[in-house]
Amino acid sequence: MDQIFRYANGLRAVHSYMDSVRSVAIGVFVSTGSINENDGDNGVSHLIEHMLFKGTKKRTAFDIADDIDVMGAQINAFTSKSTTCYYTVSTFDHTEKCMEILSDIFFESVFDEGELAKEKNVVLEEISMVEDTPDELVLETVCQGYYAGHSLARPILGSRANVSAFTPDDIRGYMRRFYTADNVIVSIAGHISAEQADKLIRRYFFERFDGAKGEKPLHKRHKASASTVVKIKDIEQANIAFAFPCYNFRHPKEMAMHAMNNIFGGGMSSRLFQKIREQMGLAYSVYSYASNYSDDGIFMIYLGANPDQAKAAADAVTDVIDEFLDKGITDREFLSGKEQLKGGLVLGSESSGAIMRANGKYLQWADCLFDFDLLLKEVETITKGDVADAAKYIFDRSAMAAAYLGRDVGEIFSRAKTRGIETP
């Protein structure tokens, strides 16, 4: 039985016992990311994630990696707009050792200046890699245009100037503000009982926090307005992205939105892929996806095309959107969209790592358990009308952001004005 633990200092934890696996996944979720940063410290959350693997009071960076490898386990981390997560996956007999290592890097990292200098260079190279990866860069660009003036516009990696300037004291100061018990969730899933999980959480996390309370900035839902960003760069491919509003996490029509995305641009049978790649041959890569947060969301479309065909490709996206809105979907598409959702849920439920991440996300954003059976029921009750409502809500041209990265090909978003959008 899945269970939530709530501790006296504000720490929360969630446990899922999985009898069918012999692994255990542990995730330590911190409710902070670029959304909590300002212009001066943008990028610090991501740098902290790197630095927690660079040495503690009793382990070097090599020791951390070696102690994990000798168990045949995995350790990693990620930083998003709203979350920083450190996690391990191991066989069940190494659960406590993995928990001890996570606790060690979380509470005892030393932030050596020499290691910090090296890791800054690594992050600067990561920023360069994004700048040299046009599809990632255009998606970042359209996100910044869509969220202009809102904290969600800030890039997770931060700026070169910020990363270069961060000091160990900057890192410690930020952690004192956000790495607190009431901002942390420990998620454990796999072949471990609730009693064992609670015992380990108490020993390695609950008892190690001081009584400090974390900062919880108030974020208002972003109000989108139409925008267009064009970046001219002498590269071989034209990169085009669109951004629209989408439902927030656990909105009553969230599942309908995901079904709509499956039909519209989420896979090889989708409208976008079939029209733009298979029928018109305008792009090798074309897809859509939704990223939603506790109180906000963004729906993204990307395609890469030959510069000579960029205008035709952008127009084709607009045509697919218009047809979707005007003519709706077929019964077969509707069935496929729902079955893809169900398949994803079922396959994810068989992985301890996936359950660990889902539990952490649901507890962080909705303060509840990830309920697999409830989600399946929600998928079953989706109607074609729900999908149509989701499409109408998402494809609001007055709130659309568009971005282009590539050679100068003139105006490529003129067709976007069809339903009332005004491009700068």
Image (cartoon, helix red, strand yellow):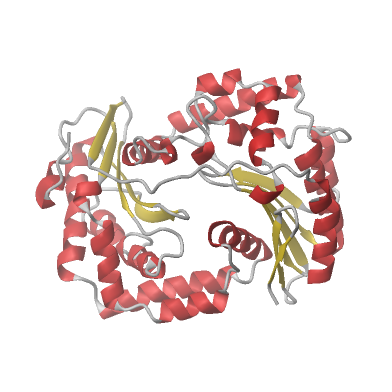
Q: Quadrant of residue 6?
A: bottom right
Q: Is residue 296 above or below residue 239?
A: below
Q: Position of residue 95 (x, y in %)?
A: 82, 59
Q: Position of residue 252 (x, y in %)?
A: 40, 70
On the picture, is 359 further left or further right than 159?
right
Query: At 27% from the left edge and 42% from the top edge, which residue is drawn?
Result: 401
Q: Quadrant of residue 339?
A: bottom left
On the picture, is 229 further left or further right than 212?
left
Q: Is residue 356 above or below residue 313?
A: below
Q: Position of residue 154 (x, y in %)?
A: 45, 35
The answer to whether residue 348 is visible is: yes
Q: Quadrant of the image for the N terminus?
A: bottom right
Count of marks, rendered view: 0
Q: Position of residue 404 (x, y in %)?
A: 28, 36
Q: Quadrant of the image for the C terminus?
A: top left
Front residue of this view, candidates 219 and 42: 219
Q: Quadrant of residue 411?
A: top left
Query: At 85% from the left edge and 62% from the top edge, which residue is drawn?
Result: 199
Q: Is residue 74 above or below residue 225?
A: below
Query: At 66% from the left edge and 21% from the top edge, which residue is drawn?
Result: 167
On the picture, is 206 further left or further right than 373?
right
Query: At 57% from the left edge and 23% from the top edge, which residue is drawn?
Result: 163
Front residue of this view, candidates 91 and 108: 108
The answer to whether residue 95 is visible is: no
